[in-house]
Amino acid sequence: MQLKFLAVALTAALTISTALAQAQAQAPIVIKFSHIVAPNTPKGMAAERFKMAAEKLTGGRVKVEVYPNSSLYKDKEELEALQLGAVQMLAPSLAKFGPMGAKEFEVFDVPYIFPTKQALYNVTEGPIGKGMLRRLESRGVVGLAFWDNGFKVMSSNTPMHAPEDLKGLKMRIQASKVLEAQMRAVGAVAVPLSLSEVFQALQTGAVDGTENPPSNMYTQRMHEVQKHVTVSNHGYLGYAVLVNKKFWDGLPADIRVQLDKAMADATVFEKAISQRDNDLALDAVRKSGLTTVYTLSPSEQAAWRAAMAPVKEDMEGRVGKELMAAIGRQAK
């Protein structure tokens, strides 16, 4: 009787164990994709595009949870969260890579380094960009793609037609030594702040102005508390899509193949909409009637370039003289 009971118990335990193993095998792989911008920005929409493509291509074996607008982590927290595995995927701006030891990525912050969008793509889609992404693996992350948010405008509550018009203004920047040097070059005071804190800082006067692509400015409502925008196109804002290396390496090979395809699809989509969305956002700022939009003339643009030119030489030691020279050759 005792042996019969033991056999029944062992059979039941084996059945439960098998059922649990099957349930675990069927449970989808969850990817938490955190970012700090609004869902209706180029990055926000591309994240959703990746989610749809990844879930479709893997037949539901992967579930992507997108967390926009700093709902999980703010600017200063997200890279550490990725390296620790608290989230699996990010698309941080290239200015943020300095603190994790990848200072070469700050080359994208150098003012006027890319004369055109095509010059930029020659770098990000070519050997230089691919090599930069590969080097991130030693820091516990895998670089999957570069995403684009275009060139930046300046905003403040005073007109900015000449570089000296920024003298003494407290200008919000992302935390970047290159951006600090850029603001010093025009006599402004650089104030590093997370994107989620910018609207309130502008509203209260803690900072006087900021620099952003129009899509970020409009979706974060900065134009509601800024009277003037200058279309300077002085700098560039781009992103690198990253995944935690330990998580990525632990995925089944066929899943990685499908996720690479989903990322390629999302990247083509993102680049196609980035310029359009920034153009629409700038037009919306103009039509709001709250902000005067000013476009620099060729001679004014030349003056801005001249004022910021020393930044390139000053930052060669930080981001790499050879890298800067290579980008200069490739960007022509």
Image: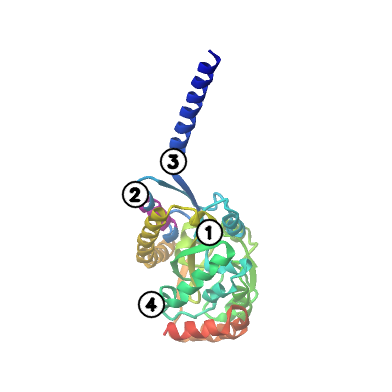
Kind of residue at disc 4: Gln
Residue in view at x 35 percent, y 64 percent: 268
Query: Marks 2 and 1: which is nearer the front?
Result: 1
Q: Tell me the SS state at disc 2.
A: helix
Indicate which disc, 2 or 3, sits on the residue closer to the N terminus.
Answer: 3
Q: Tell me the SS state at disc 4.
A: helix
Indicate which disc, 1 or 3, sits on the residue closer to the N terminus.
Answer: 3
Determine contact: label 4, label 1, CB under 8 Å: no
Residue identified by numbered label 2? 56
Residue identified by numbered label 3? 25
Indicate which disc, 4 or 3, sits on the residue closer to the N terminus.
Answer: 3
Indicate which disc, 2 or 4, sits on the residue closer to the N terminus.
Answer: 2
Q: Tell me the SS state at disc 1.
A: helix
Other residues around mark 3 within 10 Å, as few (<14) / some (14–19) / many (≥20): few
> Magenta: predominant secondary structure element?
helix
Where does residue 103 sit, x and y in percent of width and height?
Answer: 59, 73
Where does residue 33 sit, x and y in percent of width and height?
Answer: 49, 53
Q: CA distance from mark 2 to mark 3?
A: 18 Å
Where does residue 318 sit, x and y in percent of width and height?
Answer: 62, 79
Q: Quadrant of residue 285?
A: bottom left
**What is the total number of numbered labels drawn onto the structure image?**
4
132, above or below 300, in the image: above
Residue in view at x 39 percent, y 60 percent: 260
Residue identified by numbered label 4? 118
Which portion, as a residue range, is magenta?
Answer: 44-53
Towards the viewer: 69 or 81 = 81
Determine contact: label 2, label 3, CB under 8 Å: no
Determine contact: label 2, label 1, CB under 8 Å: no
Indicate which disc, 2 or 1, sits on the residue closer to the N terminus.
Answer: 2
Residue identified by numbered label 1? 245
Kind of residue at disc 2: Lys
Question: Which disc number belongs to residue 92?
Answer: none
